[in-house]
Amino acid sequence: MKSRPSWAELYAFEINREGEAPLFRQLYLQLRVAILSRRLRPGTKLPSTRQLASRLGVSRSAAVAAYEQLLAEGYTSGRHGSGTYISPDLPEPIAAPPPRHKKPAPRAAAKAEPMQPVGDFVDVTVQSDDRPFNLGRTLIDERTLELWRKLSARTFRSLAPSHFGYSDPRGTSELRKAICDYLQAARAVKCDPEQIVVTAGTQQAIDIIIRILPNRNREVWVEDPGYPLTRQALLAAGATVRPIPVDEQGIDVVAGIRSAPNACAVFVTPSHQFPMGVVLSMARRLELLAWARKKDAWIVEDDYASEFRYGGRPLASLQGLDEGERVIYIGTLNKALFPGLRIGYAVIPHALLKSFVAARYLMDRQPSTLSQAVVAAFMEEGHFAAHIRRMRLLYRDQRDELVAALKTRLGDDLTVDAPDQGMHLVAFARRGLSDLAIERAGREHGVIVRPMSRLYLEAKSRSALVLGFSGHPRRTIVPAVDRLARAVEMQSKFVPRAKASPKR
């Protein structure tokens, strides 16, 4: 009986010996594409590195390097004395592979604006600066701290067998159920635990969504002004970003349809728009959902600070209104608890679930089961709801302290109102003061403020300061405002005061 042909005899490589890419890199990339596209099925045995090198006329070291990279990234596994095999537990392919003999078009051709080096996008030193009034800071009280110690100790004492192996890339079933119960009760989200995917936070969720957006159209709407890291992630992925203006009712859907009617997605913060703090009106919500259904587009709802509403119950989610499963809902526990936790979540429509989970698996395999166990217990035992209630009162007091201090010390230079929700407020500059100049002067006085004018893309910008209040203890707020006032006074010297209008 004739033996079955080996894999090496069946698969055709295309090796470019004059190309810039090293040979091992070419082998690695072609094998990875073949694995992800399922041309090579899970469990398939690969030829030995000696056989592959001889077959292709390359050095054995090139084949060894390619196999080692695939093994390190989890695409293959080794069996002692047997050889190398494609990992049997890889997910289904994310998308159909490109035509085999057709060279992919250069990525640059799909961009509306030139892609910047990723390192130029974000000043990471700003993110870690804890001085007032930097954004995204949180506080935890002694009660939460003690509970966290006890639950962590209990988790480590038990060390269940599940913590020693691989787990579901969506997250543990216990945490997904706890998150699902919370979202249904607090945010009116329509979901079941199967749709919940645990992430490292909203930024990772956004990154995964960008990866699985349909290739037919990489045009997306973003709010203008809006969250800069979302826009920067989209640009880094080569998407065509369409800035859509924001007014007192939220994102202007009519303007979005006029600008890019066939966009494949929109990224919005409807419950507390960043940075303006406005709420997307019901009319706009229905307009947005109708457009998404008509165009088969996706709405990415970033609900980044929904827990902290100071005037009544938290607003219902946009996703809860969606009857066509066009909304991808993302949130985070990093702001509800503390940023070092690195746990967020996404509620994925069924049509995108397989692709999202596959991308999450390939990117990061799975979240830490130990951290998930602590968080799940914290939520299931009622500590999370109690923590939110206490922090809501604490942050409200800090908000009120900041608003009062700003009005007392800077009432002639800034206009500020207490926001109903969120972890930051906006103070609009008067008399032509530059928020950029105040930011620079503030740093010299030990205060961090974000200039809102920098967050605009095409809409007419407004000079305003974005100040976080949630993570700065009340006792530090008034002294920090005093320092900010000195910084503003430095700028006021160079801005002539407007003359009073003559009386008629």
Image: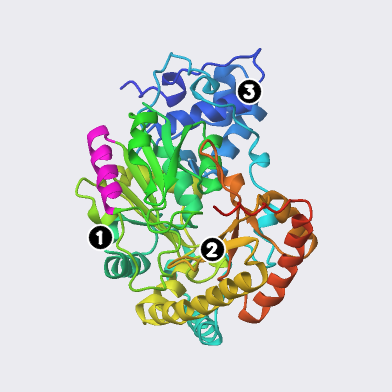
Callout 1 crowding tier (Cα within 10 Å): few <14, some 14–19, many ≥20? some
In the image: residue 381, left or right of residue 409: left
> Is residue 292 found inside the magenta-colored segment of the image?
yes
Q: Amino acid at mark 1?
A: Asp
Q: Quadrant of the N terminus?
A: top left
In the image: residue 177, left or right of residue 492: left
- Regarding mark 3 in the picture, which secondary structure is present there? helix
Nearer to me, 39 or 93: 93
- Regarding mark 2 in the picture, which secondary structure is present there? strand
- The residue stretch that appears in magenta: 282-296
> Is residue 84 found inside the magenta-colored segment of the image?
no
- Residue 142 horizontal/vertical position (percent): 56, 86
Q: Which residue is mark 3?
A: 23
Q: Amino acid at mark 2?
A: Leu
Q: Amino acid at mark 3?
A: Leu
Pick out the residue farthest to the left: 323
Please tell me whether residue 259 is drawn above or below residue 16 in the rendered image: below
Please tell me whether residue 456 is drawn above or below residue 466 in the rendered image: above
Q: Which of the 4 image quadrants contains residue 331?
A: bottom left
Residue shown at 51% from the left, 19% from the top: 109
Q: Are marks 2 and 1 in contact (CB under 8 Å)?
A: no
- Residue 101 horizontal/vertical position (percent): 43, 13
Q: Which residue is mark 2?
A: 425
- Residue 270 horizontal/vertical position (percent): 38, 53
Nearer to us: label 1 or label 3: 1
Q: Which residue is mark 1?
A: 192
Q: Which of the 4 image quadrants contains residue 484?
A: bottom right
Residue shown at 27% from the left, 53% from the top: 282
Measure the alpha-carbon separation of dots 3 and 2: 54 Å
